[in-house]
Amino acid sequence: MRKLIAKIFLVILVLAAAGSFFLAFVPFNKYVACVRGSTGQMHDIETKEATSQAVEIGESFDKYFKNPKWHHLESGNWRHIVEFNGECDYEGKPAKAKIQFIISQETRVESILDFKILYRVGAIAIDDKILTTQERMDFLDKIINSK
């Protein structure tokens, strides 16, 4: 009986260690995962009509940028922000981009497997210069439609 308990304890210990190792090297955040896994489609500012095909945000960003990094931030008033940082070419020159996705207060967590997230694109900065609305739309369109 003691051997059986010892083996069960050993298995649990090994699984816990493997899980800790995995989480240490593969950070998971539900907000980041939801933004990355969502689909994006550009719409004309005035007509609101779709200007591009829907594509997965994470896949598009990973293709377009070098050294892509996603972070979850929480502001002081319980507001959640997913921030993306990456390197790209902008207007023919190497640049560092920062894009913020602001999580809506209407976001619902129904269970760990059923997480409904609503967000909007916030500020976009290229080399610390904030883009105008039209520049943001053009830049996002370029990212989403990159091959």
Image (cartoon, rainbow, N blue to C red):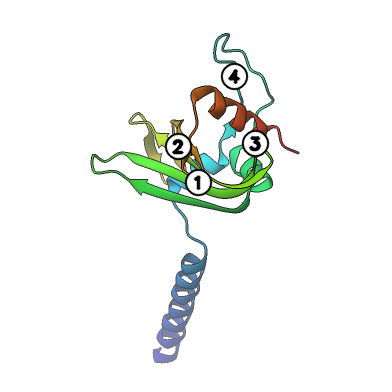
Kindly report the distance in space between the C-alpha atoms of the residues bearing marks 2 and 1.
8 Å
Residue picked out by circle 4:
43
The kind of residue on which mark 1 rests is Phe
Q: CA distance from mark 3 to mark 2?
A: 15 Å
Q: Amino acid at mark 2?
A: Phe
The numbered mark at residue 143 is: 3
Residue 146, given in percent of the width and then of the height, sits at 72, 37
| Looking at the image, residue 102 lies above or below residue 134 | below
Mark 2 / mark 1, whichever is N-terminal: 1
Residue type indicated by callout 3:
Ile
Q: Which mark is residue 84?
A: 1
Position of residue 122 measured from the top left corner of the image (x, y, whole percent): 43, 32
**Measured Cα–Cα span from mark 1 to mark 3:** 13 Å
In front: mark 3 or mark 2? Answer: 3
Left or right, 16 with reference to 47:
left
Q: Is residue 40 visible?
A: no
Mark 3 or mark 2, earlier in chain: 2
Q: Are marks 2 and 1 in contact (CB under 8 Å)?
A: yes
SS for callout 4: loop
Residue under pointer 2: 101
**SS type, badge 3:** helix
Q: Are the residues at dot 1 and dot 4 in contact (C-beta closer than 8 Å)?
A: no
**In front of the other: 124 or 18:** 124
Residue at screen point 41% across, 49% down? 72
Of the residues shown, which amino acid type is indicated by label 4?
His
Question: Where is 14 relative to 106, above or below?
Answer: below
